[in-house]
Image: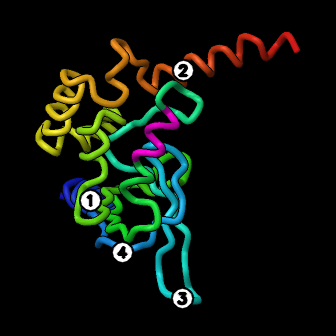
Amino acid sequence: MHLRALSSAFLLFGLLALPVFSQAAPRTCLVVGISDGDTLTARCGRAGAYERVKVRIAAIDAPEKSQPYGQRSKQALSSICFQEKARITEIDTDRYGRTVADVDCNGEDVGTRMVSDGWAWVYDYNRIATKRGGGLFKLQDSARARHLGLWADSKPTPPWDWRKHQRNESSHWGGFF
């Protein structure tokens, strides 16, 4: 009997120690910077108490700035959001400390727009894209079929492959200089 009570206590403690994942309430912020096609900086809060928030747009991955189509992707995001009020719904924090969030500018989901216009790939970060019912993948296929944005290139390099190649190049040459 004592063992049963002890195991029940451990089970209860274990359940209480589990993290609770919930989506934060949306915040309305002013977009004050665009880093690349999937990352922006927003000013949130009120006058005298502003907070700058670096936001990685959920479920997409855009070309890096120095990668082919990187500057065009950044310009596309700028045309949608720069100096606009954005509705930011936090989902997570990435390993770089950025807020991973769904972002709406002018009532439009930014990730959806970037993928449908061909300026970003679907990036299944923590299965966020899959939870959206696969709609982003269909939009990506449509953009590819219509040769929009980066899909004008018959075989564009996904940013995750490009970053991996860059890491390998720098480690390869790192020991010689």
Q: CA distance from mark 2 to mark 3?
A: 41 Å
Picture layout, residue 67 above or below residue 131: above
Residue visible at 50% across and 54% down? 98
From where the camera sits, is residue 2 visible?
A: no
Element class at badge 3: loop
Locate the N terminus by quadrant.
Answer: bottom left
Q: CA distance from mark 2 to mark 4?
A: 35 Å
Label 1 packing within 10 angstroms: few (<14), some (14-19), many (20+): few
- Residue type, label 4: Thr
* Extreme residue in the bottom direction: 48
**Image position, residue 49 (x, y; %):** 56, 86
Residue visible at 55% across and 80% down? 50
Q: Which residue position is annotated with label 2? A: 164
Q: CA distance from mark 3 to mark 1?
A: 41 Å
Q: Which residue position is annotated with label 1? A: 15
Residue 47, numbered label: 3
Is 38 contained in the magenta span?
no
Label 2 packing within 10 angstroms: few (<14), some (14-19), many (20+): few
